[in-house]
Amino acid sequence: MRRHICLGFGLGLVLCGAASAAWAQASPTLTAARDALTAGGHPVTQEIVTLTVDGQAVIGTLALPGDVERPPVALLLHGFTGSRDELPIANTDEGVFSRTARRLAEHGVASLRIDFRGSGESDGAWEDTTFTGQTRDALAAIDWLAGDARVDGERLAVIGWSQGGLVAAGAAAADPRVDTLVLWAPVAHPLATYPPLMGADTVAAGLASGGAPVHVALPWGAEFDMRTPFFEELYLVTPLASIAHYPGPLLVIVGTRDTIVQPQPLEGRSYLANHDGPEELLVLDTDHVWDAFGGPDMVDEMALWSLAWIGSTL
């Protein structure tokens, strides 16, 4: 039986559809795990690592709890146009993922966060980015973690944010070594997310360009080029089909004020509707970037709920 768990922070309980009254309480296991988390006390060490995919370098940061032998490990997958540290958080010197990695390590969970090829410090050109290419990067990172003696590759979580959630679903479906999965505001329907951001005319131009780069301008001012394969994969890659092939534990976290992957919580619920296995949905009073422009509070909540899920499912 599926569990749909809807929680609210700041403004109280967020109701989720006609059956919401039955979903008002988090599962006892997850609530107890979350309540047991206090300030983490493990020292944190970090190092830059390099893995190779299709002859290109993928750069990552491995964060370790320095006094834990072979800790469980989480692979962190960033979003569209992002990088491994992710969006800078106001009033801090950290990004959403660099802070999350530190929080995980303080509580005894190692992590590897990578720059997908074409992003950050990794090789490749951004205009050649595709969903399937990023999924290959994620699978290579899983291979790398399985071979690193400092972490326990048999206790592996994947955390994917936004487009990284789409990629995480594909990786989890393809690799049985993924033991538990956490999706933050994951893209569920590419055709419902990208054309409104890029413009329908831009998508049409990308499909018709024959592989030539097409200029893309996003509402928040970002501008870049993309090639035809990315636009084709809006139609060809279906993350909900991927999640149907992943039988493991699934936590989906979404925000009621998300204007990028929307409408919520329906986008989040669609993952659960296509997944057969242990699962929960958390709906928070937040936006697509976990209110990072206002400070770190919600990002810390995201880390704690993710830690609670990882601890109760690995």
Image (cartoon, grey):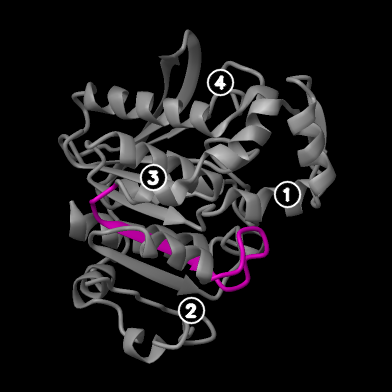
Q: Residue at label 2?
A: 9
Whether pointer 3 and pointer 4 mark residues with C-beta atoms closer than 8 Å, the reply is no
Number of other residues with Cα within 10 Å of mark 4, as a class: few under 14, some 14 to 19, many 20 or more: many
Is residue 295 in the magenta section?
no
The answer to which quarter of the image holds residue 67 is: top left
For the residue pair 30 and 258, the one nearer the viewer reads as: 258
Q: Position of residue 307 (x, y in %)?
A: 31, 57
Q: Position of residue 270 (x, y in %)?
A: 45, 63
- Residue 122: assigned label: 4
Distance between mark 3 and mark 2 Cα atoms: 30 Å
The residue under label 1 is which amino acid type? Answer: Pro
The residue under label 4 is which amino acid type? Answer: Ser
Question: 12 left or right of 314?
Answer: right
Above or below residue 63? Residue 313 is below
For the residue pair 189 and 300, the one nearer the viewer reads as: 189
- Residue 242: assigned label: 3
- Residue sticking out furthest to the bottom: 21
* Element carrying mark 3: helix
Q: Between label 3 and label 2, give the one nearer the viewer.
A: 3
Report the magenta stretch's main SS. Answer: loop
Number of other residues with Cα within 10 Å of mark 1, as a class: few under 14, some 14 to 19, many 20 or more: some
Q: Residue at label 1?
A: 195
The residue under label 3 is which amino acid type? Answer: Ser
Is residue 255 in the magenta section?
yes
* Element carrying mark 2: loop
Q: Disc 4 or 1, which lies upstream in sequence?
A: 4
* Element carrying mark 4: loop
Magenta stretch bounds: 246-264
Name the residue located 50 percent from the left edge and 54 percent from the top edge: 186
Name the residue located 21 percent from the left edge and 72 percent from the top edge: 1
* Element carrying mark 1: helix
